[in-house]
Every structure is written in structure tokens, then in C-alpha cells.
Amino acid sequence: MPLRWCTVLTTRVVAKDLYSGFTGVLQCDGYSGYNNLKGVQRVGCWAHVRRKFYEAARISNTLKTCEPLKLLDYMFFLENKWHKLAPKARRRLRHSKMKRLLKQFWRWCDTSDALPKSGFGKATKYAQDQRPYLHAILQYGAIDWSNNATERNMKGYVMERKNFLFSGVPEGAKANAILMTMIETAKANDLDPMTYIGSLLDELAQFPEWRKSSDL
């Protein structure tokens, strides 16, 4: 089954257009714009859950005693051990080893008396809202426990794109951002960037809209 990872925030309409015709598994954060995409099985990211509990524990000075954070850290410890296993083996281990930890984690969330607006309250609410998507990862051994790898790959691109907005004239900055988007798109799909851009320009030149804009 095709897999995709997404870290870019989009509106619901843009997300619908972006994944039109795609059928498979999409791993992303908790943004609601990705809900209800036809033909798409959405799965969550446990790193986003952990970050919220980590921040709440850091602020409350309970990093060493926070039960949900301990459970999450052990989940990631196990996933790190299984990282190089084949998808079927990882799926089997998740069902045999991870379900007990998940049961403990959700029991804590369901019985938590944290105030809704507190750090722990917000972290718990986020996790509970994402519960079906987070549990869906158990069914897909090819999917990592989080989309951290994707975010790391995108970090340099996002930083450069932001810098482009403040370099040179606005038209040049926009052109640089578009070019970087094309390059990263090619790399994400295992294509040679130069070949991809050349083919794209050849194809675009055949469209009447492109020829009209070039004549202006």
C-alpha cells in the first residue's frame, strides 16, 4: 500500500486537492485539514503526543516522575530496537509488546484529573483526539512510530524557504522558494532534480496558459 508522510499545514480544501486520486496511508500531525480524505487511511504521530507531555512535565518540574512520559519514552525505546526489522515483524511485535503500554497510557489519560487548560490537560486532550489515528499505526509495520524523520528532512528546506522571503527583490525570493519546492519534490519522489525540472519545463511549455504568460 502506498505511504505518504506530511508535515505541511494546509487548509482542508488544499489537502483535498493535494491528495486527490491518492489511495494509501498518510502519516501526519493532528491538523484537522487532513480528516476525511477519500481513499486515505490516516495515521498519527506519537512524537507530537510526546512533545506535549514533555513540555507539560518540564514546566511542572516532573520530568522524572511523569507516568505518561515514561510510558511514551519506553514505546520509543522499543521502536528504536525494532527500527530495522521487516514491516511484518515490526507489526507482530507491536501487537504483542506495545498493546500493554498503550493500555496503561490510555488508562492514565482517561482517568486524569488535570485541568483542561493546564499543560497536562492540553496534552491529554490532544492525545485523546488523535486516539484512532495513533492506534492505526499498529496495523502498518512499514510506518514509523512518528514522522520525525520526515520533519528532519524538511527542516533545512523550510528554513531556506523562510530566508528566501527576505533576500533580494520579492519576485526573486518567490522564484527561489518555488525552485526549492520543485527540487525537494523531486528528491522526495526519488527523482533527479535536474531531470525533473527539465521535464517539467518542457511539459509546461505545451500549455496555452504558459505560452500566454511567457508572451507578457
Image (cartoon, rainbow, N blue to C red):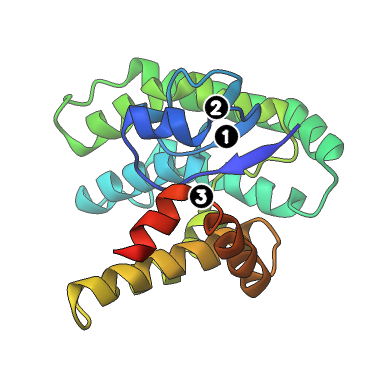
* Kind of residue at disc 3: Phe
Mark 1 surroundings within 10 Å by alpha-carbon count, few (fewer than 14), some (14 through 19), many (20 or more): many
The residue where tag 1 is placed is 26
Label 3 vs label 2, nearer the camera:
3
Q: Residues within 10 Å of mark 2 (few under 14, many from 20)?
A: many
Q: Nearer the viewer, residue 156 or 45?
A: 156
Q: Helix, strand or loop at disc 2?
A: strand
Is residue 138 shown above or below 151? above
Pointer 2 or 1: first along the chain: 1
Label 3: how many Cα within 10 Å (few below 14, some 14–19, many 20+): few
Residue 215, percent across and down? Answer: 35, 64
Which residue is identified by label 3? 207
The disc labelled 1 sits on which kind of residue? Leu
Image coordinates of residue 164 in percent, x first then y, are 28, 75
Label 3 SS: loop
Q: Which mark is residue 173?
A: none
Say which of 176 and 125 sits in front: 176
- Residue behind mark 2: 42
Q: CA distance from mark 1 to mark 3?
A: 31 Å
Report, in whole angstroms, how far the alpha carbon at label 2 lies from the one at label 1.
5 Å
Q: Residue at coordinates 66% horizontally, 31% vertically from top-left? A: 98
- Report how far apart the C-alphas of labels 3 and 2 lie in the structure: 35 Å
Mark 1 / mark 3, whichever is N-terminal: 1
Q: Are marks 2 and 1 in contact (CB under 8 Å)?
A: yes
User: Could you tell me the amino acid type at mark 2?
Assistant: Arg
